[in-house]
């Protein structure tokens, strides 16, 4: 049977890296962030709703969403963030379910991985067979975000505060990939996890 795995973790814990390794191992990756970009593409009802709710300044001159402006707006206001999540999560969930069904129909033994930063907050946990949490130390999250972006400490803390706390994520996990050490150590944990599912999911990551 097809396995549906929910992959999540805090900001900069390494979800994308683990997802890439899972893809190498033969998994089918469905990324919630990529789906969200499709849902708010120019001309979509969701983008029109965002512009109507938050103002036309959320769009650039080409009618494309100004992601930085929206991020700043919603992470500074819990009510605004809740409104946006209520707009986006239902179509994202529906798209993930539909794509999973198509993959499972074509590949009955598939490993289907849902990469969802807000997997627990958005209610996706009940829709997957196992929840895999990628974890690292909070100070590592700060350092990694600083290394890859120009966000201030205050901005980083605001985004972290909008996610569920680390203890809640770890308590909800069926499997934890500790990404606080070396890449080799994280790969070893991933290999061990894959071995518990099925021997034919592809080459070891």
Image (spheres, rainbow, N blue to C red):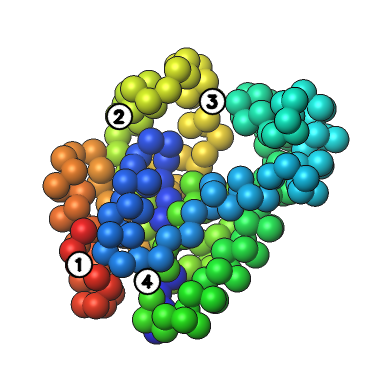
- Distance between mark 1 and mark 3 Cα atoms: 39 Å
Q: Residue at x 52, y 39 (%)?
A: 163
Q: Is 129 displayed left or right of 88 in the figure? A: left
> Of label 4 and label 1, which has the lower sequence position?
4
Give the SS element for disc 3. helix
Which image quadrant: the N terminus?
Answer: bottom left
Residue 171 visible in the displayed image: no
Q: Residues within 10 Å of mark 4 (few under 14, many from 20)?
A: many
List the single residue furthest toward the front.
62
- Distance between mark 2 and mark 4 Cα atoms: 29 Å
Give coordinates of residue 91: x percent, y percent: 68, 58
Locate residue 94: give its quadrant. Answer: bottom right
Which residue is identified by label 3?
A: 158
Q: Residues within 10 Å of mark 2 (few under 14, many from 20)?
A: some
Q: Residue at x 48, y 68 (%)?
A: 128
Q: Residue at x 25, y 43 (%)?
A: 179
Closer to the eye: label 4 or 1:
1
Instruction: Return the residue nearer the eye: 149 or 7.
Output: 149
- Distance between mark 1 and mark 2 Cα atoms: 30 Å
Which image quadrant: the C terminus?
Answer: bottom left
Instruction: Return the residue nearer the eye: 29 or 157.
Output: 29
Which residue is identified by label 4?
A: 111
Q: Residues within 10 Å of mark 1 (few under 14, many from 20)?
A: few
Name the mark on residue 140.
2
Q: Residue at x 26, y 64 (%)?
A: 25
> Of label 1 and label 2, which has the lower sequence position?
2
Give the SS element for disc 1. loop
């Amino acid at each position: 049977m097809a396995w549906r795995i929910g992959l999540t973790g805090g900001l900069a814990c390494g979800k994308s890296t683990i997802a890439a390794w899972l893809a190498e191992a033969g998994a089918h990756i469905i990324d919630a962030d990529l789906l969200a970009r499709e849902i708010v593409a120019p001309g979509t009802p969701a983008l029109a709703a965002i512009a109507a709710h938050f103002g036309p300044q959320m769009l650039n001159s080409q009618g494309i969403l100004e992601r930085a402006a929206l991020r700043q707006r919603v992470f500074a206001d819990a009510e605004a963030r809740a409104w946006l999540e209520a707009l986006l999560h239902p179509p994202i969930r529906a798209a993930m379910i539909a794509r999973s069904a198509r993959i499972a129909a074509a590949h009955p033994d598939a490993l289907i991985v849902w990469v969802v930063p807000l997997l627990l907050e958005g209610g996706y946990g009940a829709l997957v067979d196992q929840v895999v949490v990628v974890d690292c130390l909070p100070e590592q999250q700060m350092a990694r975000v600083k290394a890859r972006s120009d966000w201030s400490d205050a901005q980083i803390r605001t985004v972290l505060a909008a996610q569920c706390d680390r203890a809640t994520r770890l308590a909800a996990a069926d499997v934890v990939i500790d990404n606080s050490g070396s890449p080799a150590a994280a790969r070893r944990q991933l290999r061990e996890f894959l071995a518990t599912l099925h021997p034919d999911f592809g080459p070891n990551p």
